[in-house]
Image: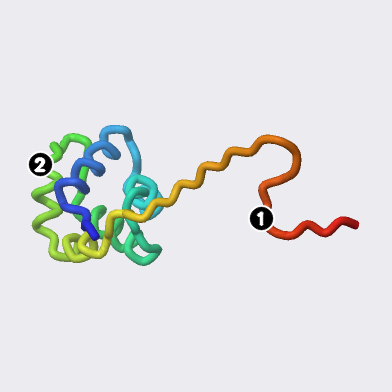
Amino acid sequence: MEFITSAVLSGILYDMLKHGVVISAGSVKEKLKDWVVGDIIAPALSDELNKLNLNDELSESAIEKRIDQSSNILELISKIKKVENVTTIIQSHSGSGDNIGRDKVSK
């Protein structure tokens, strides 16, 4: 399973800051929707990120350097994993009836 890196996180944060998105647990979870971010990690990560005093004047590399200097953030992002098992179900249905796969009882 692939972990998120500080470079990926800095790019996401850079985009958030440029678009005026406040760094919060909810916004972190939303932006990291392709990653598994638990309800415990998201608030802790947003708290640590807010301690870095990030703003929209910083470049991606400056944000990455600040992330790399925080052992707490590096520990938290090592616990975030890429979503790998995405299942997509596509159903085609024609004719009468429904797509429920069980016995139907007529009344």
Q: Which mark is residue 35?
A: none
Count residues near mark 1 (Cα–Cα under 10 Å), then give few for <14, some for 14-19, many for 20+: few
Q: Earlier in the sequence, mark 1 or mark 2?
A: 2
> Which residue appears at 13% of the width and 60% of the height?
70
Callout 1, which amino acid? Gly
Residue 35 location (% of width, % of height): 32, 53
- Whether residue 1 is situated above or below residue 26 in the rendered picture: below
Location of residue 77 (image quadrant):
bottom left
Q: Quadrant of residue 91?
A: top right
Residue carrying label 2: 61
Q: Amino acid at mark 2?
A: Ser
Q: Nearer the viewer, residue 41 or 35?
A: 35
Q: Residue at x 27, y 59 (%)?
A: 81
**Residue name at image x 26 percent, y 36 percent:** 15
Q: Secondary structure at mark 2?
A: helix
Drawn side of residue 107 relative to residue 95, left or right: right
Residue at the image point whose x is 16% and y is 51% from the top: 6
- Above or below residue 87? Residue 43 is below
